[in-house]
Amino acid sequence: MHFAGLKAVGESCTKPGLYYHNNVYGTLVLTEAMAEANVKQLVFSSSATVYGNSTSVQYVEDFPLAAINPYGRTKLMVEDILRDLSAADTLNCVENPWKIALLRYFNPIGAHESGLIGEDPEGIPNNLMPYIAQVAIGKLPQLSIFGNDYPTPDGTGIRDYIHVVDLVKGHVKALAALTGDSFQNGACKAYNLGAGHGYSVLEMVHTFERVTGQTINYKIAPRRAGDLAEYFANPELALKELNWRAEKTLDDMIADTWLWQRNNPKGYDANS
């Protein structure tokens, strides 16, 4: 399972070379090493950002791919590389062909329900939920909401959020599928992992306040480069071929995040 990669849209716009070197070149090195060892089953951590703009806000796997920021383009480039490797094995009638599942994450959030495993980003968080949680715990003074003039009901961006535990289960299902009939002769297939509906940034803030009883201090800031107004998954293919669907609710995601954050108010101490 290939999770190694830089993943912040905003940072990728200011440091594109770093993202191309790490995400694309790093994957080339990995696949070369795997091929040398004749280990050719791979679950790749891709992203919904490979889709770019669309006339529909519910993304299906066969939509045209046209990432609009460097982060998304690195994920799309890696997908193209993996598709080409798989296609080459088919052309060459390779005895042990590549079997690859491309998992297009939407927005993973949450933590393990035990409160023992959670997200502890270094420095200022790049993603919404850990930022909200750090404001709630007092580690950060204020949340910046980037744009309130999008063509959405409350003007803030809408995203499809998925509990990280559901995401993990999706990987287990994908790994099992690689040994099944649909990958028997080698293949490279993409699957959306998302809930199939979205929440706006303000909805996330207000739901966090309701679930936790904490007040979130926020301000409206200018839009960020590379952000879309709204998108969410069509997860039907993952249900059909992987027997997977998101099960946890937004309340679950927030409650588990808050338990982790309360247990680690200053971040995780590896020496404790």
Image (tube, rainbow, N blue to C red):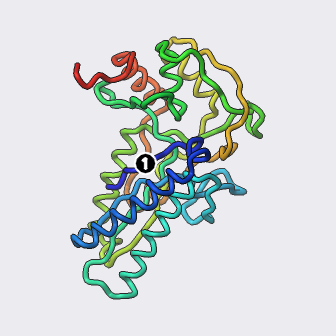
Residue 61 visible within the image: yes
Image location (x, y in percent) of residue 28: 39, 65
Please give the name of the residue rendered at 36% of the width and 30% of the height, measured from the top-left corner. 118
**Quadrant housing residue 84:** bottom left
- In this orientation, which residue lies closer to the viewer: 201 or 244? 201
- The quadrant the C terminus occupies is top left
Q: Residues within 10 Å of mark 1 (few under 14, many from 20)?
A: many
Image location (x, y in percent) of residue 134: 48, 20
- The quadrant the N terminus occupies is bottom left
Q: Where is mark 1, residue-wise?
A: 245
**Quadrant housing residue 103:** bottom left
Give the amino acid type for the residue marked by disc 1 in the picture. Arg
The answer to whether 44 is drawn above or below residue 120 in the figure is below
Please give the name of the residue rendered at 33% of the width and 87% of the height, measured from the top-left corner. 93
Please give the name of the residue rendered at 77% of the width and 40% of the height, measured from the top-left corner. 151
Kindly state the secondary structure of the residue where label 1 is placed: loop
- In this orientation, which residue lies closer to the viewer: 58 or 145? 145
Q: Is residue 88 left or right of residue 73?
A: left
Q: Is residue 160 left or right of residue 152?
A: left
**Quadrant housing residue 64:** bottom right
Image location (x, y in percent) of residue 155: 74, 33
Image location (x, y in percent) of residue 71: 55, 51
Please give the name of the residue rendered at 71% of the width and 28% of the height, measured from the top-left corner. 221
The answer to whether 264 is drawn above or below residue 42 in the figure is above
Residue 210 visible within the image: no
Q: Is residue 48 left or right of residue 155?
A: left
